Image (tube, rainbow, N blue to C red):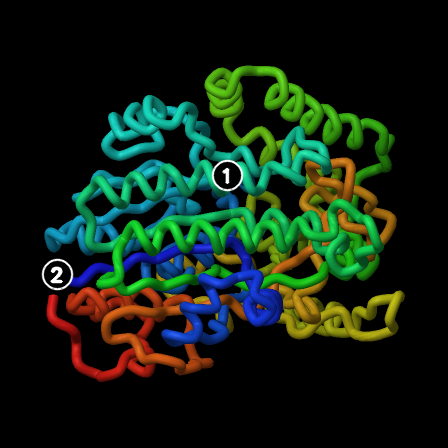
Amino acid sequence: MRKRVFVVALGESTFDLIEPWAAAGHLPVLASLMRGGTHGRMRSQVPLMTPQLWGSIVTGRTPGHHGAFDFWQRSPKGAFHAIDGSALRCPTLWEMLSRRGVPCGIVNLPFTYPPAAIDGFVIAGEDAPGAHRSIAHPPELYDEITEKFGRYRLKDIFPGGRQKTDYLTLIDEDVAAQTEVFEHLFRTRPWRFGMAFFSATAIAQHYFWRDMAEATPGDPFADVVLTAYRAVDRALGRLLEAVGPDTTVFVISDCGAGPLRSGVQINTILEQHGFLARKAAKPKAGRRLVAGARKQAQALLQRHLPDRLYYQVNHRLGGLKTKVQSYLAQSDLDWPRTQVFSRGKEGDLFVNLKGRDPHGIVEPGADYEAVRDRLSETFMALRDPSTGEPAVERVYRREELFQGPMLEHAPDMVVLWKDTAYMPSEDDRNRDQVFVERWREYMNWPTSGSHRVDAVLIAKGPGVAEGRTIMTARLIDLAPTWLHALGQDVPAELEGRVMQELFTAATVPAA
């Protein structure tokens, strides 16, 4: 029998929850996989941005090569544009395999739009503009799914326009509906490498971590995170049955999860320390009106329009959220007096460099390095007033994190927050404060969960060692390891390694 590899990918999952819940009997399928296979905490990448993490997972390359650093890219004119899977500058694993005649099935994975025309099938994930035929390869696959299962649930679990009470039933419904589609595809279509993604764990942790951690008797939201993990565990059981016992199965996440300690206004820090200047004060009401109008309009459209029409409208607006956030973050910057500014959800710092940026004032060379030295000193001295402890673990120069032809597209510096428990504001509201309660980006209740650097890796199947724990895995090691498990040669340009310690023998299994 020819080797098959099937990967169940989870958004932002953590062994801090999986291990105790598996031991308590809440996650029997995951518990069985860990007992009968190999598992361990996998090192994610800094910064913990979804596009760069999944880009590295599916290409076996670092962001300096694949080119996806954040949810957007900055143009030479200084504008920020939302990206999708077409931003990747390296071939994905399914493109490599397809060229070798190995059929693949990729479903709902982040940053896979537009779907690649491969030997096999693809249904794009969250970067797709909406649920219609363009998200599928071949396009008629979308027709098949909607005829059999009704509308395809692409982003139903995302919080735009939702009420908190919706999630008491929405997570179970969403995971069950997705599982039906996934199971159908992997039972009825030819494939040898498959991936299916669930976002339920990520969504639940971001918006209900505090409800879990600070639960009181009778709190209806205390178990929303557990509900997400249990739903995924049940889905995993059905999918394992669908792919069969002779398939090597992996369960992975892009990063871990944990409590959010505080929101942070990075541009306020930069302003207070003389790196950034603003134009003459404008009424804050105008900025708040712009932000509120955008979110209210999107929520109303999503709540009241039929799905197909909503997604068509949202697609035609194309990147409106990114444009509004860029406006809010930068419209009042006094560029001739601004040396550094921030954009993004982790800790990206951009030097306003002469000769590179449209309004650049910092000279390349010694001046540039002096600015970066002062930035490092400034952020390393930052303390959380609620604890008195340092808020920053480290400040990286971009060349310390990234190497490769796409380095020039990376931020000049990246702040790694202490325990990755702080999350910068996307649009620079509440700018008079440095530390703020996490903004209510989509809902009328605040975000309370954040990312962590320890991701999940579980493997079981033919050739995989039983009962073994590994602690040296990295995201870029996944693609080479999957190629190895399929009996395929690993291209020399891949930056990761085959995790030989995961297998019972170091020999490449037969194809």
In three-dimensional space, the C-alpha distance between marks 2 and 1, rounded to whole angstroms, equals 40 Å
Residue visible at 22% across and 39% down?
117
Quarter of the image for residue 39 reads: bottom left
Say above or below: 187 vs 310: below
Say above or below: 102 vs 327: below
Query: Looking at the picture, how far across and down is residue 379, in whole percent?
Result: 73, 68
| Secondary structure found at label 1 | strand
The mark lying in front, picked from 2 and 1, is 2
Quarter of the image for residue 331 reads: top right
Residue visible at 40% across and 55% down?
237
Query: Looking at the picture, how far across and down is residue 61, in whole percent?
Result: 35, 63
Query: Looking at the picture, how far across and down is residue 369, in whole percent?
Result: 60, 70
Quarter of the image for residue 23 reads: bottom right
Say above or below: 368 vs 281: below
First in sequence, mark 2 or 1: give its number. Answer: 2
- Which image quarter is the N terminus in? bottom left
Residue visible at 25% across and 26% down?
140
| Left/right of residue 179 with respect to residue 89 in the rendered view | right
Please name the residue that numbered disc 2 is placed on: 2
| Secondary structure found at label 2 | loop
Query: Looking at the picture, how far across and down is residue 86, in whole percent?
Result: 35, 42
- Which image quarter is the C terminus in? bottom left
Q: Can residue 469 be seen in this snapshot?
A: yes
Amino acid carrying mark 1 in the image: Ala
Using the image as rendered, state which of residue 396 and residue 470 is in the foreground.
470
Using the image as rendered, state which of residue 455 and residue 170 is in the foreground.
170
Amino acid carrying mark 2 in the image: Arg
Q: Can residue 337 be seen in this snapshot?
A: no
Count neighbours of disc 2 (C-alpha within 10 A) and say few if under 14, some if 14 to 19, many if 20 or more.
Answer: few
Please name the residue that numbered disc 1 is placed on: 82
